[in-house]
Image: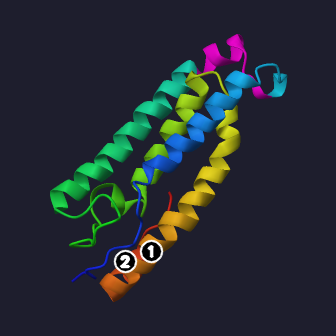
């Protein structure tokens, strides 16, 4: 049984990742001569496969999370109420697999774009995600699903 109000998040959470990445990427294009914040060609070439792996893993995990929500027929975007608590698929390992996947994608894209600046913004993105989204989602789920959510929180970590 779910609460009919939803978590009260009024924007799609991936927006935080897009804004943070773009801010870092644009800053990188303006401030290109800071050697500690530029990877340089040799390092970027060595990390390219790792970055592609991070991007692929991120897309796979986030996509698996979305597909699991679709199969459960519950809201993906947290401006709507959940019809059920999803604890299968990637939600067996993380309470926030979509956010884990987006974080992995974000890091991989930073490396592929040869830019450290988005990584400088990543802690801000994750803090904003925590304060603006995750706290609301967790309060909502606790109110909507009570003991079922409390037991789930005891079994499964927030991130990994």
Secondary structure beneath label 2: helix
Q: Is residue 138 left or right of residue 41?
A: left
Q: Toward the viewer: 27 or 17?
A: 27
Q: Which residue is mark 2?
A: 141
Residue 52, x across and y down, in percent: 48, 25
* Residue at the (62%, 59%) spot, across then down: 127
Looking at the rendered structure, which numbered label has been put on residue 102? none
- What secondary structure do most residues of the magenta stretch adopt? helix
Q: Which residue is mark 1?
A: 138
> Badge 1, how many Cα within 10 Å: few under 14, some, many 20+?
some
> Badge 2, how many Cα within 10 Å: few under 14, some, many 20+?
many
* Residue at the (64%, 18%) spot, across then down: 44
* Residue at the (28%, 51%) spot, across then down: 66
| Vertical side of 58 occupied by 72: above or below | below
Q: Are marks 2 and 1 in contact (CB under 8 Å)?
A: yes
- Give yes or no for residue 129 being in the magenta stretch: no
Region in magenta: 37-47
- Give yes or no for residue 40 being in the magenta stretch: yes
* Residue at the (64%, 21%) spot, across then down: 114
Q: Quadrant of residue 39?
A: top right
């Amino acid at each position: 049984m779910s609460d009919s109000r939803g978590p009260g998040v009024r924007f799609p959470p991936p927006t935080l990742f897009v804004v943070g990445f773009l801010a870092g990427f644009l800053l990188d294009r303006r401030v290109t001569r800071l050697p500690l914040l530029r990877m340089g060609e040799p390092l970027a070439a060595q990390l390219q496969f790792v970055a592609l792996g991070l991007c692929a893993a991120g897309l796979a995990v986030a996509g698996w999370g979305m597909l699991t929500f679709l199969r459960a027929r519950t809201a993906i975007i947290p401006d709507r109420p959940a019809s059920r608590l999803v604890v299968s698929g990637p939600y067996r390992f993380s309470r926030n697999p979509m956010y884990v996947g987006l974080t992995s994608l974000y890091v991989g894209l930073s490396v592929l774009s040869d830019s450290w600046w988005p990584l400088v913004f990543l802690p801000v993105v994750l803090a904003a995600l925590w304060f603006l989204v995750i706290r609301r989602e967790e309060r909502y789920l606790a109110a909507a699903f009570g003991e079922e959510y409390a037991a789930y929180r005891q079994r499964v970590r927030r991130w990994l």
